[in-house]
């Protein structure tokens, strides 16, 4: 009876250890995924800011008027890049 209880206890301890390792690995993987998602978001925002800050003022004003108040830098950058030739011609 004592050996049966001991075997049960050892199996229970091994299972708990594996569950703990599985949770740690899962958290590590989730952390890496979150990290790369944040890097992607930051990179996209930097890209949009770079486009907005280097575009001609006339283009910025035309896009801002077209999109309206509350438009984001990403929306402005997307509109500018989609119609770059047109917006660049406004400043000439």
Image (cartoon, helix red, strand yellow):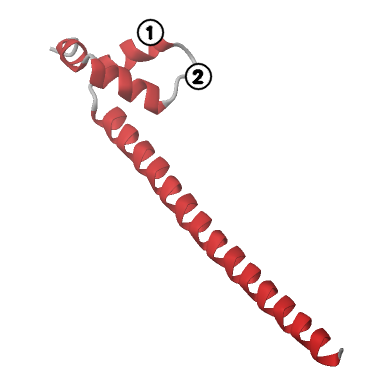
86 or 26: nearer the viewer: 26
- The image quadrant where one finds the N terminus is bottom right
Could you tell me if residue 75 is visible in this image? yes
- The image quadrant where one finds the C terminus is top left
Residue hosting label 2: 70
Residue hosting label 1: 66
State whether residue 44 is above or below residue 11: above
From the top left corner, tell me how far across and down residue 33 is, in percent: 46, 51
Dividing the picture into quadrants, the one containing residue 75 is top left
Estimate how packed mark 2 is, as few (under 14), some (14 to 19) or many (20 or more) residues with alpha carbons within 10 Å: few
Q: Is residue 18 left or right of residue 40?
A: right
State whether residue 4 is above or below residue 44: below
39 or 6: nearer the viewer: 6
Question: Can you name the residue that lies furthest to the right here?
Answer: 1
From the top left corner, tell me how far across and down residue 46 is, in percent: 34, 40
Q: Is residue 71 left or right of residue 3?
A: left
34 or 13: nearer the viewer: 13
Q: Is residue 51 left or right of residue 24?
A: left
From the top left corner, tell me how far across and down residue 51 is, in percent: 27, 30
State whether residue 40 is above or below residue 28: above
């Amino acid at each position: 009876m004592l050996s049966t209880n001991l075997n049960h206890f050892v199996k229970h301890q091994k299972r708990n250890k594996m569950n703990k390792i599985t949770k740690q690995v899962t958290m590590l993987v989730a952390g890496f995924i979150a990290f790369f998602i944040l890097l992607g978001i930051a990179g996209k925002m930097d890209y949009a800011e770079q486009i907005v800050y280097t575009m001609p003022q006339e283009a910025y004003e035309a896009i801002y008027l077209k999109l309206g108040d509350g438009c984001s830098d990403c929306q402005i950058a997307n509109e500018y890049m989609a119609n770059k030739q047109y917006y660049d011609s406004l400043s000439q």
